[in-house]
Structure formats: structure tokens, C-alpha cells
Amino acid sequence: MDATILSFLLLDGLQNGVVYGLLALSLVLVFAVTRVILVPIGELLMFAPLSLVWLLEGKLPGTLWLALVLGGAWALMARGRGALLPLLGGVGLFLLSLLAKGVPPLAYLAAVLLVVYLGVASYRVFFQPMRGATVLSLLIMAVGLHVAYQGLGLVFFGPEQFRPAPLLSGEVVVGLSWQGVLVLLFAALGLVALYLFFRLSLFGKALLAAAENRLGARLLGIRPEEAGMVAFGIASLLAALSGLLLAPLINAAYFMGFMLGLKGFVAAILGGLASYPVAFVGALLVGFFESFTSFYASAYKEALVFLLLVPALFYQSLRARTVEE
Amino acid sequence: MKRWLVALLVLGLSALAQEALKVGVVVSATGPAASLGIPERNTFLMLQEMLDRAGGVAGRKVQFVILDDASDTTQAVRNTRRLVEEGVVAVVGTTTTPASLGMIPVVAEAKVPMISLAASKDIIHPVDAQRYWVFKTPQTEELMARAIVADMVARGVKTVAYIGFNDAYGEGWARFFEAEAKAKGLQVVASERYNRTDTSVTGQVLRIIARRPDAVLIGASGTPAVLPQRTLKERGYASLIYQTHGVANPDFLRVGGKDVEGTLLPAGPILVAEQLPGTFPSKRVALDYIQRYEAKYGIGSYSTFGAHAWDAWLILKPALERALKRADPAKDLAAFRAALRDEIEATRNLVATHGVFTFSKEDHLGLRFEDAAVMVRVEGGRWKLERTFR
């Protein structure tokens, strides 16, 4: 191996790693606040670019109807004044989607808001009613949602891939396109924004508190439902933006979400589903590891990446002192 | 529900016309293989109309009993059992390889001839006691690999690299392509794998480029075949890139765009029917099929897959006519089925849309790659005939 190949592999690993990293951060955040392992995060990521493609072609994506149906269920469950938010949001989303048909800037905005609305509505409709359930029940629900959303993705968008035009075209240096730089910049920005959000804003602190001790947070007037919604909202936002930035590089299709989400999950596990910095570093590790195994043993790449879980889980099991919940 | 309607309709009609010859058809009109199965079903619906107008075969009415297997092996087997019980003289189908393999024991046990519409060589090779009853129309990977290697040799390629799906499709291609390449004196310098869901193949591509091959074959199908090709281009690989016939659909061109310009691939000759030289045997038959299909289903609606179904009927029809002279299905169905099988196997030099069929005791595919494969190049976002092997 020479220096050129090494640098290409490192760049490739970095670019994939930061995306896994953002997904891992979302997974850790959602898990800390709601105890949900958000398996369908890959599907949320996939919905964004495919909805965008549909809007750009002047069609309304099937995801819009899904979001509106879930929004309707949300409004029914909330009733009274609480129904105002989902109803207004749904109407706004619908109008925005109508306006966004064939108008690129609005279409990007609509695709992001669509996914965020869908993410929050999923939490409100599926997870909040079972907030008292065990982690296992929540996981089963999450896996069910993942399977359902992937199936719906196939129904909405068909079996083939789509490739939206990149926001920035051209290469910076050999091996790194401007679009790739955008992905890296977005990851850095996302990290800083999350850090500031948790350190400086009251809401972020409340979220941390809710994650730390739910009962205690509740005694101090923090509503866990609201914290859950915000956590899902942030996770969906990160997923949607990553999906939109990634799609021109990797082609978007209904099946793309699961593997991305799963690798984010591996990274999150490396961080023990608790530590943000370790999860992010773990994600970079997964990215680099994947890039190098694809060079040396491509046929076994996936197996080797998931093998990374074994030492991590072994370490976690050694470290665990008490059995939670 | 549509398939039940079709089946009921066909059953109702066949009750009216007692003496009609029933031909069973199983296709994947729904499920993941639907984009292949729908044109196959359409082709048989079109054939039914034509036969009704012409009054059937040799004075006997013909009824296609068309069932949908939803791209599912269990359903395909169940459909086949039902068709056998209904007394069909032959079974055509199904669209996918696993389901076709599942149907073989059923038709062999009932001693009913079957013509599969799926790709794999395993369906008809080796011709053992069960496959004695089974024939098929689509080209195998082996045959297409032979076409690719022949083209590589003609272009003076010495070293090749392979990158393909990490699944049955990619492994099948790796096996046949590498064997054929070695037999023709090509050196395979790299053999890499990737997954349809992969988001990056940089590692594999770097490894390939480091070996400096004269040509690269990408063993993948549909739009996921674009990623390795784009990565190769991005990393400055400027030599020949081959794809398999698994990419011969418009979606590949749509997603690939400029990145897949110049791609070489083997294809059934019908893909570029109007560009074939006048002396090419299957040209007239292929154009005839395309014209009929487009007249019924719209311009540009035809696909190479529907043509495999058409070919199955082209083989079956003369075999039926000959078998009718030897046995009467109304009196002795088993004897007629056996006679029909023998007559299918006796098919010689039958010109169809994808090539020329000559079956024998050992060969139930019956295609020679010179007639059944052409090299196509992607040029200006269209399929352009590069060369034939005749």
C-alpha cells in the first residue's frame, strides 16, 4: 500500500464515519431520553432524499400522506389544545409540499420538515403511549416500525435508485468532492450545535436532566413527553439533513437506510449507548475499519464490521455493575 | 386479486370450450420480480387474443391458464400443482430462478413438460431424471460470460478484474466468468465483492486500480451496478468497463447518466433489434414481437423479458402441432404430455426473438451464444449495437 491509496482510504473512511457518527449521536440522544433504540433512523434518513426527488419531479411523495395520517392520529390522541400543533403542522406541511413541487429551495425545506414531522409524529403515536414499557418492548416496536417504513419506502418510491443533483459539484482534491466537504462541514456544525445546545440552552439542559434521571427531572417540572418529542425531532433533523447531503454521493433507494442505521448503531454501542464523544469516535472507527476491510477483504467486509461489536459488548458486560430497570 | 379474476375468467372460458388445450403459465406479476413478470404475463394475454382470433393450434382451441406466484417459491409450487391437476399439457414459467427450481420436482413427478423463463443454468443442467422434463428460454450467465470473454479477447485484453454483488448473482458471475476467462488465457488480477446496499466501494476500486487491469467486469444488476462504475471513473480508471445483462433496463441509464457512457455489456439481440444487420437470424422475429407488443401496450413498453415468454410459445406451438398428430390429449393426457416433451426436445433451428433454439438430449437451453448474445455499448444514453459474434 502506498501513500495515495492510504490517503484515499482514510478520506473515504472519514466521509462515511462522520455520517455514522451523526446517526450514532441521534441514537444515543434518543435512547438516553426515551429508552428507545431508534432502529428506523435509517428509514427517516432515506425518506428525505427520495421525497426530495419526488417533489423536484413535481409529484407529491407518498411519505407526505404517511406523515399526514400519523399527524391525524397524533391530533386524535392529543385532543383539545394539544391537537393544535399537529393539525397546524400537518396543514402547513401539506401547503408547503404543494408549493414546493418543482421549486428546488422549497423542495429541500419541505423534505426536511416532512421527515422531522414524521419522526416526531412517530414518537407521539407509537412510543409515547408505551413509555412505561420495558426497553425490550420499545425495541420490538422500533424494529416493527423499521420493517414497516422500509416496506412503505418500496411502495412509495419503487425498487430502483435515484440520484438527486449535488448541491456543489466538482472536486476539491482528488478523492474529495465538494459535496463530500459539505458532508464533513455539516457533521462538524452538527457536533458544535449539539454541544452548545446541551451546554447553553435551558431546553438542552432539561433534556440532559431528563436523560440523567427521569423522575428527578419530572419533579423539577420537565415533561418527559416533551423531552421525547424534542429528542425525536433532533434525531430526525440530523437524519434528514445527512440523507439529503449524502444522496448525491451514494444514490438513494428504499433499502439504503438499514445498513447506515445499523452501522450508526454499532458506533453507538461502542459508546455504550451513553457517551456522545465515544459514540462519535466509535463511528469514525467503524468508517475507517470498513474502508480498510473493503480494500483487504471485500467479501467479508460486513461480517468484520459487525464483529467489532463483540469486543465492545464484552467490555460493556465486564464493566456493567448493576442491572438497569 | 387481479390474478384470481384472470384465473376465474380463464377457468370459466375453458368450461365453455371443453376440448380446449390448456397451457399452464406461472409468472411473477407481483412482488420484487414484477418488472420482469408483468411483460411476460402481458405477452401471454396478447397471445391468447391472437389464438382466439386464429382459432387455436391445428384446429384445437388453446387456453392459457395464467397464475401469479407473487415472486414467491411456495406460491409457484402451489400454482404448478393446481395447473397439473387441471390437466394442462405443459407449464410455462416462472420468472425467477429459485421458484423455477422449486417447480421442477412437481412437473417431473406429474410428467408434464415445462419451459422456464428464468436465467440460471441450474434449471436445465445437468439433464437428469427430473430435468428431463424441463427446458428454458433465457440465456444463462455462462453463455453471457462467454460473450464477454470473446469480446475481451477480440479487443486484445490481457488482464481483467472482477467486482460483483456479494450474493448469488455476483458469485454465479464470478464462477462462470473467471472459469471462461482463464480458459481463454486472460489473467484475472482481482476479484472483489460489494453489497447492493453499500454506500462506498472505494476500497475495492483502489485495489482493482492498483493492479492496472485492461478491463473490469461489474457483476451486478439494476441501479446498484452504477456505484462501482462511477467510483472507477472518479478514481481515474479510463480503460474498458463491462457490465452484465442485468443492467439492461432504462433505470440504469437514468441513474448512471454520464458515468455509464461507453459501458459494454452483453444482451439478448432483441434489445437492439432495429440495429441488427439484416442477416441476423432473429431480427425479423424480434421486430415482429416488438411491433405487436407496442401496438397493444404502447410505444417503448416492450422489454427483453416479455420476449422470453414469446420465445417459449414459439417453441411450444410447433411442438404441440406435431404432438397432436401422435396422441390425443382428450383420450390419453399422459401420453400426450410425453409426446409433447419429445417434440419440444426435437426442436431444431427454431428462430426466436433471442436467438436460434436447437435442443438435444444433453442441452435443454438450446441457444448458441453467437445467435443469442450481442455486445451493446451505452452511447448518448441509449443502447447501441457494438458487435455481433456471427
Image (cartoon, helix red, strand yellow):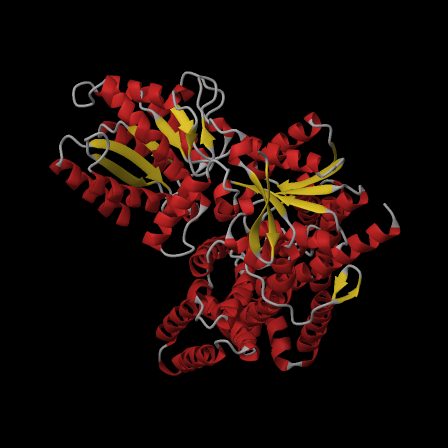
Residue A61 in the image, given as x and y percentages of width and height: 45, 68
Would residue B124 be found to the left or right of residue B198 on screen? left
Residue that appears at 69% across and 28% down: B184
Would residue B326 be found to the left or right of residue A112 on screen? left
Quarter-of-image position of residue B161: top right
Tell which residue pokes out farthest to the front in this image: B278
Tell which residue pokes out farthest to the left in this image: B16
Tell which residue pokes out farthest to the right in this image: A3
Q: Is residue B249 visible?
A: yes
Residue A72 vs B214, above or below: the answer is below
Nearest the viewer among A209 and A1 is A1
Q: Is residue A303 visible?
A: no
Residue B188 vs A100, above or below: the answer is above
Nearest the viewer among B225 and B216 is B216
Residue that appears at 75% across and 43% down: B208
Residue B1 in the image, given as x and y percentages of width and height: 26, 49
Would residue A85 be found to the left or right of residue B174 on screen? left
Residue that appears at 31% across and 23% down: B112
Residue B225 in the image, given as x and y percentages of width and height: 60, 49
Q: How many labels sit on residues?
A: 0
Quarter-of-image position of residue B191: top right
Nearest the viewer among A103 and B253 is B253
Residue that appears at 63% across and 71% down: A208
The C terminus of chain B: image quadrant = top right
